Amino acid sequence: MKIRLCQPSDLADLHRINEENVPAVGTVTVAELDGLVAGSNATFVAEDNGRIGGFLLGLVEGADYGSPNYTWLSERYPSFAYVDRIAVDAAFQGSGVGARLYEALEVHVADSRPVLACEVNTLPPNPGSLRFHKRLGFEEVGEQVFEPGAKAVVYLVKSLV
């Protein structure tokens, strides 16, 4: 498995993988995903024999991004790297792809950002993602309810210093 930076030719595969992982990640159009990738600090792709197995889209503070989750973190951390989304193709899940994608972002921002941040859905529940992030050393720092009984997240941060 090779981890590399995203190329424009990857967009269709990234969109397919993203949509296959809804609601764990938010749905986006191809054009929206293209804009997110273009505005990212780094988007990493996991590739195995020419097949894309997953991706991670990372932002840093100061991005022109209206996500309420990004805003929540921006209000609390003056400098951070943010995982806007990570999605892994079903055929590659459980193979360590997610951890390798996180590792690539951590190495990319380690000398420039003190924390790595993300959120995980608690409604609808995503216990597998929460366990995954805790294994990687993330700690809960807050939560937000968007639609009572339907949509809520927990915010997680990992120190890079």
Image: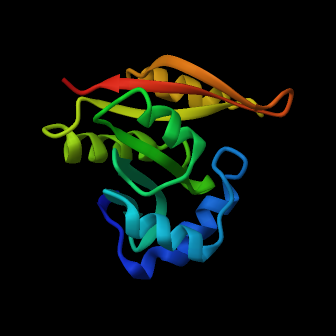
Specify the farthest residue to the front. 75
Left or right, 108 with respect to 37, comes to left
Left or right, 138 with respect to 42, comes to right
Q: Report the number of discs.
A: 0
Residue at (66%, 44%) from the top-left corner? Answer: 24
Residue at (43%, 57%) from the top-left corner? Answer: 64
Quadrant of residue 112 in the image? top left
Q: Residue 89: x percent and y percent?
A: 58, 57
Q: Residue 42: x percent and y percent?
A: 32, 58
Specify the farthest residue to the bottom. 9
Q: Is residue 32 visible?
A: yes
Residue at (63%, 68%) from the top-left corner? Answer: 16
Vertical side of 145 occupied by 35: above or below:
below
Q: Nearer the viewer, residue 31 or 20?
A: 31
Residue at (72%, 47%) from the top-left corner? Answer: 23
Quadrant containing the N terminus in the rendered view: bottom left
Quadrant of residue 20 in the image? bottom right
Question: What colour scheme has been applied to the protein in the rendered image?
Answer: rainbow
Quadrant containing the C terminus in the rendered view: top left
Q: Residue 32: x percent and y percent?
A: 58, 70
Q: Residue 98: x percent and y percent?
A: 45, 43
Q: Is residue 48 visible?
A: no
Specify the farthest residue to the right. 149
Q: Nearer the viewer, residue 29 or 64?
A: 64
